[in-house]
Amino acid sequence: MNFRMIVLLLVLMIVTLGCTNEKDDSKRLKTGVEKVIRLRDVESYFKKSLEVELGAGSSDIAKFWDVFKTFSKEEVGDDGRNVESGLLYECGFTDMTGFKLGKERFFVNFVRQFSVYEDNGEYSHMEQLVSHFVFEPTDEISELESDALWFFFDEGGELEEYFAEIENQESFKAALKNKPIQFEIYQTEI
């Protein structure tokens, strides 16, 4: 085999391998070597990741949690602006009407928060990707307390330790044992 043939085979292999990547790269920015998810595409990218991993309409929290943890490590950017990321696990009780007219329900939220700064360092705005699960209050759930656990990437700390802390919460364990009656994912500016 001559040198040209080897180069041609290498190029063909690289192109073929690059084309079979199952991730949706159309939602990513290319900045240097790293690939970055565009802030405006975070919700659709995350929903697509869930669909690929879990199938359409699945609300299995254990599997969802695995996808969320993976997604939490993905880089997010916004054309020419700095995006800092944080995570929030929160749970509690709400009557879901805001007027205390309904029956209280238990909720669990997995949130990824994005603080956006202009390239000159000035704060622009904040957005959140919220994954919201709602449960009927069983006897076990009724005994739980509201909680909120934050993690900010720019403050250091070990991400895996944060995940383990959530997984050790009684509210998280209860959520794994129960089927949600409502589930939604949305991205919002706050």
Image (cartoon, rainbow, N blue to C red):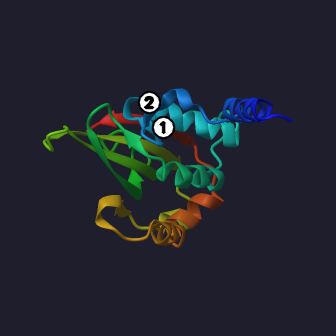
Image location (x, y in percent) of residue 47: 55, 35
Relative to 88, say whether 21 is above or below.
above
Label 1 crowd bin: few (<14), some (14–19), many (20+), radius 10 Å: some
Residue 106 showing in the rendered view: no
State the mark number for residue 41.
Answer: 2
- The residue that appears at 34% across and 47% down in the rendered structure is 113
Q: Is residue 142 visible?
A: yes
Residue 185 is labelled as 1
Residue 152 left/right relative to 179: left
Q: 93 and 56: which one is in front?
A: 56
Q: Decide which of 96, 70 is in the foreground and name it.
A: 70
- Residue type (three-letter) at the residue carrying disc 2: Asp
Q: CA distance from mark 1 to mark 2?
A: 13 Å
Q: Amino acid at mark 1?
A: Ile
Quadrant location, the C terminus: top left
Residue at the right extreme of this rendering: 1
